[in-house]
Image: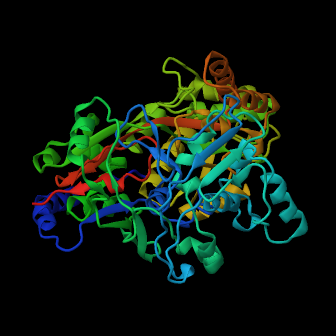
Amino acid sequence: MSHRGLRRRDWLAGSLGLAAATGAAASREGPKTLRLALPATETQLDPAQSESSYYTYQVIASIFESPLGYDYLARPPRLVPLTAEALPEIPADYRQITLRIRPGIFFADDPAFQGRPRELTAADYVYSLKRFYDPRWNSADLYIFEGAKLLGLSELRQQALKSGKPFDYDTEVEGLKALDRYTLRIRLADPDPRFVYQLALPYLSGAVAREVAERYGPDIGTHPVGTGAYRLASWRRGSLIVLERSPGFRGEVYSGQPAETPLAQSIAHELSGQRLPLIDRIEFSIIEEPQPYWLSFVNGRLDMIEARGSYGQLAVPNGHLAPFLRKQGVQLALEPQADMQMTYFNCEDPVVGGNTPEKVALRRAIALAHDGALWRRIVRGGLAVPAQSPIAPYTYGYEPDYRSEMSEYDPAKARALLDLYGYVDRDGDGWREAPDGRPLTLRIASLADQLGRDGNEVWYRSLRAVGLRVVFEPAGWGELLRRSRAGSLMMWGYAWSAATPDGAFFLGIAYGPNASESNDARFRLPAFDKLYERQRVLPDGPERAALMREAKNLMVAYMPYKVHGHRIQADLLQPWLRHYWRHPFMRDIWRYLDLASH
């Protein structure tokens, strides 16, 4: 359980590599290639089957296109048309969205189209959104659409479940219609002022052609075909994903409303009049361990990385770029993130689950025992701020002045709470037993990598200090996702990143009907569910903000999640990388980037 930092010989090797990196990059020939790394194993490259992976989303968003998108350089973030001709028409009751798809957009060539150009139509979006309801795909993101109550679609899904027959894509429903070749209309049972944001996420509303889905069937996740700037060129599972510029992509000339900051204005000036994408090829290497991830960058084999863990401390000490890196021309892009990192308690687990006073007390005591400062130092390299609630900064519902027990580190209070509710050491072995005298052992799942081990060390030290025994269950990302959805984990932690400017998503992770989907904790509390449902249909304003605050208070009181912090992202960029500015919600930014010639 020891925390191991970067050894001196590793640091020197990296230093020598970076010193030669510019020369190595200068010698690159052939297609202009952006070299990136995914620090987690990729999953399906299919919107309906993707497993809520931030890194997989980056690949999917480069291949598929949603009707709407975001202005890359606008802050605050601004919706813009992508494949739509204009922003949608939305009536005052927020129950309907109508938009027109731009004619003349085509899917990348594929054998499924039998040699003919295949134009994007409104019917493709109808089909693509229906796929989330198809039981065959077991979509992890179905809850987003079910919660929005698109008229008739849940009933269509239930027919398939009850009959055991294939999902009926051909039955027309009121909630999702192609009114003509290019006009798409969505109707909702309840007002939803913010559903429009889901139409700007390629991994939720990216267009999939029916011919492709039917040709490749269960293998569609390895045969992504979209209308985006890039197409899949090759894929070695767990090793390398290569995208190449799609020959049939229509291209686009940058236009937008850049923020009034020097960086945004400078990027906008350089992009002015240029046809996108600027990069010919993107290589995503799968590098899960921090050391090879770091050394690939310092040796010039990656164009950018996220500074993480102990390497983050070396690269960005106290939030500043290390002098060694600055000397080599490396750029630091430091951006607070609209996200939160947490550990959930499975509220159906017999040890930590339930809403009885002693079980709530146990969860609160575990949360109070967790050393947040140590976590921020070891796991995040100092690049995080304490979290007071699950709602992330830069989203609606976040309150900078809100304070709660969520951020407290108080082992004495934790011990007192455990004593009060009967979690005491009865046999003198140094470990507490449950109130009924049975042995008490916590089980915490984690990724089987160095960052996972670092996080486990923080938990071990913290829980040992209050007399709680813990064992760790390391595994790969895909395996943990499957076990989490099956409800077989007691505790597990990872990060949720906001996909839209609305903070209600972070309340939705405690909404009862979302259990086994975004609600990994399987938390159920009728009082909370009512608050969530009331705020969801309201427009932004004081009434909604007050309901969201009440919901946050209940999440703190019942503690189904221990939220550790909100991350500050430190991106390290090679000297030759141009036009990079991390967007809080966009995942398809690569088409704006360029590599300087040298």
Task: Give left or right: position of 66 versus 558.
Answer: left
Number of marks present in the image shown: 0
Judge by depth and name the residue closer to the eye, 2 or 485.
485
- How has the structure been colored for display? rainbow
* Res. 431 in view: no
* Residue 177 image point, x, y percent: 71, 53
Seen in the picture, residue 79 relative to 494 is either above or below; the reply is above
Residue at the (20%, 74%) spot, across then down? 30
Seen in the picture, residue 53 relative to 70 is either above or below; the reply is below
* Residue 181 image point, x, y percent: 62, 59
Residue at the (67%, 38%) spot, across then down? 508
* Res. 329 in view: yes
Residue at the (42%, 52%) spot, across then down? 2
Seen in the picture, residue 107 relative to 426 is either above or below; the reply is below
Task: Give left or right: position of 451 versus 256.
Answer: right
- Quarter containing the C terminus: bottom left
Judge by depth and name the residue closer to the eye, 482 or 32.
32
* Residue 8 image point, x, y percent: 20, 56
Judge by depth and name the residue closer to the eye, 39 or 112.
112
Residue at far right of view: 163
Residue at the (44%, 75%) spot, across then down? 235
